[in-house]
Amino acid sequence: MLGELFTDDKLPMMDKNLSRVIKNEKDHVFLCGDSLKILKTIPDESINCVVTSPPYWNLREYDVAQGSNVIGNESDYNKYVKNLTEIFIEVKRILTKDGSLWLNLGDKYHNKELLGMPWRTALSLMDNGWILRNDVIWDQMKGTQSSKDRLRDVYEHLFHFVKTKKYYYAHDEIRIAPVKKPKIYNGEIVSATGVSGKKYRKQIKESQFLSEEEKNLAIKALDEILREISEGKLVDFRMTIRGEQRAFHSNSTNVSGRAKELETKGFYFIKMGANGHLPSDIWRITPEDTWRKDAHYAVFPEELLTNPIKATCPENKIVLDPFSGTGSTVATALKLNRRGIGIDLSEYYTDLAKKRVKDINRLLF
């Protein structure tokens, strides 16, 4: 068993199949062993994307060899955060400069108190150099709860971390296509939500807050937006005009770029392109049941993995999961034409993951 190679205190050599995936000679590998020790064998900046869900603290027992260092079995939750942080410091080292980490964590009640485990971990990672770009709320839309003195738990966090302020993000790959399209109404082009520009044009012309030059520029810009809608480049828009509407977030030019536009130019537009809009940071996805035949209760739904992989890992590059369980991350990566590396301490889950990917390869090839 490969895991036996990683029980020594000495730093082991990189596994040959892991090396082949990194060299693009193989499309995936599953390794059974201690994540931290295996991560230490991986070269600097060789992995493009990491998507993972570590075991939650003191939530369940995992089927691993006796004496193994199991994340989640710590007697103290501060030690759990420390152990996770140590692993993700190593993840940061092996990620490319433009790479991303997507970290899914659920919370934990202990002695009637909600511990805030996801945020304890996220803040620790930020203190160690990670940049947090998004906190996605995963609404699982179902759940059970025996407690009668608090609300049901139906969501978890999916944090998006990066190493640097400039990183790979293929936003067009995950855009949601508009349901409605522009149309002609009474001889006029109107947006997908029925905006013709008449109201804005009237507000511009009658404004007491715009100079004549600003009015002319605003009318010209509005005509250009309507032209783009007629040509199919945009499907919808909203216009904010000084003195008529307020800036979206704040009227303070110190905190809002939009407010600064209003001050200096007198107007700005929010546009929706014909290729759609980006998803919000609330994802409504039910947990996966297909691979819950065994004792693994925390199976990633592939729908949850698709956007992170498509947006932050280029095709034929590498997605890694240091707590791979039944292999959802690697399976999804392969379906999306990426390479995959899975690491797990459990030989049982590793065997399940291998079977899962073998079944996928039969369908794909």
Image (tube, helix red, strand yellow):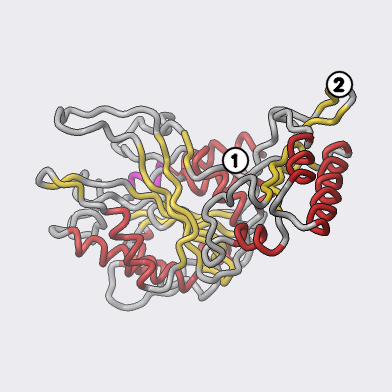
Numbered range of the magenta stretch: 348-352
At 26% across and 62% down in the image, what residue appears? 81
Question: Magenta: predominant secondary structure element?
Answer: helix
Q: Amino acid at mark 2?
A: Asn
Does 228 lie within the magenta span?
no
Q: Amino acid at mark 1?
A: Asn
Q: Residue furthest left?
A: 111
Q: Determine crowd level at label 1: few under 14, some 14-19, many 20+ residues with C-alpha closer than 10 A.
A: few
> Can you tell which of label 1 and label 2 is closer to the viewer?
2
The one nearer the camera, 250 or 173, is 250
Q: Are marks 1 and 2 in contact (CB under 8 Å)?
A: no
Q: Is residue 225 above or below residue 313?
A: above
Question: In which quadrant will I find the N terminus?
Answer: bottom left
The one nearer the camera, 299 or 306, is 306
Q: Is residue 255 above or below residue 143?
A: below
Query: Residue 204: x and y, percent?
Result: 76, 46
Q: Which residue is mark 2?
A: 186
Question: In which quadrant will I find the C terminus?
Answer: top right
Pointer 1 or 2: first along the chain: 2
Q: Residue furthest bottom?
A: 10
Q: Which residue is mark 1?
A: 361
At 69% across and 36% down in the image, what residue appears? 177
Side of 125 relative to 145 (left or right) = right
Query: Residue 35: x and y, percent?
Result: 36, 62
The one nearer the camera, 11 or 47, is 47
**For the residue labelled by badge 1, is the local secondary structure a helix, a strand or a loop?**
helix
Q: Is residue 213 above or below residue 128?
A: above
Is there any visible trace of residue 186 in the rendered image?
Answer: yes
Query: Residue 50: x and y, percent?
Result: 49, 58
